[in-house]
Amino acid sequence: MAYRSTPLRIDRDHALRERILECALSRVADGGFAALTMQALAEDVGIATGSLYRHFRSKGELAADVFASASQREVDALGAALRGPGDPAQRLAAGVHQFAARAWHSRRLAFALIAEPVDPEVDEQRLLYREAYAELFSELLEEGRKAGVFQLHSPSLIAACLVGAIAEALVGPLSPPARAAREAGYPAPALDDVSQGLVLFCLRAVGVKELV
Amino acid sequence: MAYRSTPLRIDRDHALRERILECALSRVADGGFAALTMQALAEDVGIATGSLYRHFRSKGELAADVFASASQREVDALGAALRGPGDPAQRLAAGVHQFAARAWHSRRLAFALIAEPVDPEVDEQRLLYREAYAELFSELLEEGRKAGVFQLHSPSLIAACLVGAIAEALVGPLSPPARAAREAGYPAPALDDVSQGLVLFCLRAVGVKELV
């Protein structure tokens, strides 16, 4: 008898896939993509390594799915802040503050998402998600330009600049060497300093005259 | 008799290694890292694929070496511009203009260096070279701050922001989809627009009052 995909079986497959992704995300949050090996993950989930490959063709594909799922949360959170209450400059400041704070509170995961060297499949997703962030900023910049709050010519170019600036400013403080230094008691940048510096940088760069 | 490394042999090895790197760079400049396969490269060089592995343990290692060699040229060129004639604001503008122009004139290579999804060994090098760029900017920002030309608190944070902003602003216009659109006759951003937008962004962000 042929092996059939019954509705019950599809539900179970879906549930197991979600559980695998959850366990994988938890590994990446603790130890970065370097900690995401198929064998360790199979043990976490409590299934055979071979069964993992029924759900994800390769480790690269799995890593890309974990990346996309974690990044979508950040895109949604940023979108909510940039479209929240306040004038465009206040919302830009709030969005950048929040993005930095979220990264700071899940440093290992944030570094993994932004910059950890990893499979090219994840690099592909990084490009796509950076575009998603840039679209959110672009929408706000366009609105602020029309309102006369921002002075800029090309919202899409400046949106890309903001995405790059924010990501790169966080790479250093979130990186494993910075973590090691901090744990060894060396002075380390504080979230408030980084966040305020970033906000000021972004507001100035979009031509806000009266800084919030 | 044991196989010995004579001085002549070391020279020859070195020359061949350099030739391999040159051919590899030429492939990446034409078709990105995607075009850098060991087999095609061995054919270009005129040696057996197996011989390539005597010089580079893996494709990832080779790609990382090509990346480092091409990136070092950019770091050197940027350093020369940022340390060239003019006041700090003029030099910042000149450096950004030049960086964008160099990228524009070798789009495929620039996209490969900045953002093409590729082996994690290249990602590692990207992190290192971004630090090298940031150090150059940091030096200039510190100088400009002391001279009262730039208004900023943390040169190192702002330097990272500039590196991220410049790279990310170029990713879109240099990307393969943008190239395809341009070749199909769709309107595409011009170097001058991107470059001027970037320079204005950077000068404002570092608090230059009278824009050059």
Image (tube, coloured by chain):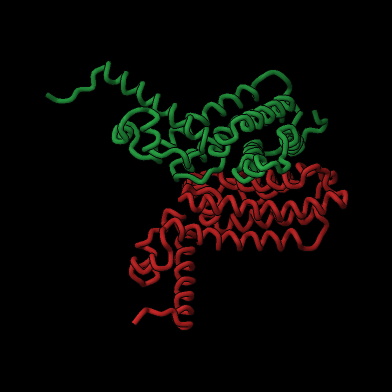
Chain colours: A green, B red
Residue B172 image position (x, y, % from top left): 56, 44
Tally of marks: 0
Q: Residue at position x 80%, y 42% from top?
A: B153
Q: With respect to residue A35, does B133 lie above or below?
A: below
- Relative image position of residue A12 (x, y in whole percent): 31, 20
Name the image quarter holding the N terminus of chain A.
top left
In the image, residue A7 above or below residue A76: above
Specify the quadrant that holds the C terminus of chain A: top right
The residue lying furthest to the front in this view is A184
**Residue A131 visible to the viewer:** no
Image quarter of residue B57: bottom left
Q: Is residue A187 left or right of residue B28?
A: right
Q: Nearer the viewer, residue B11 or B174?
A: B11
Which residue occupies the extreme right position in the image?
A: B148
- Which residue appears at 42% of the width and 28% of the height? A21
Residue that appears at 32% across and 29% down? A47
Residue A108's place in the image compared with B126, above or below, is above
Residue A197 visible (yes or no): yes
Q: Is residue B65 left or right of residue A103?
A: left
**Residue A62 point in image, percent of width and height:** 40, 35
Q: Vertically, is B97 above or below A175?
A: below
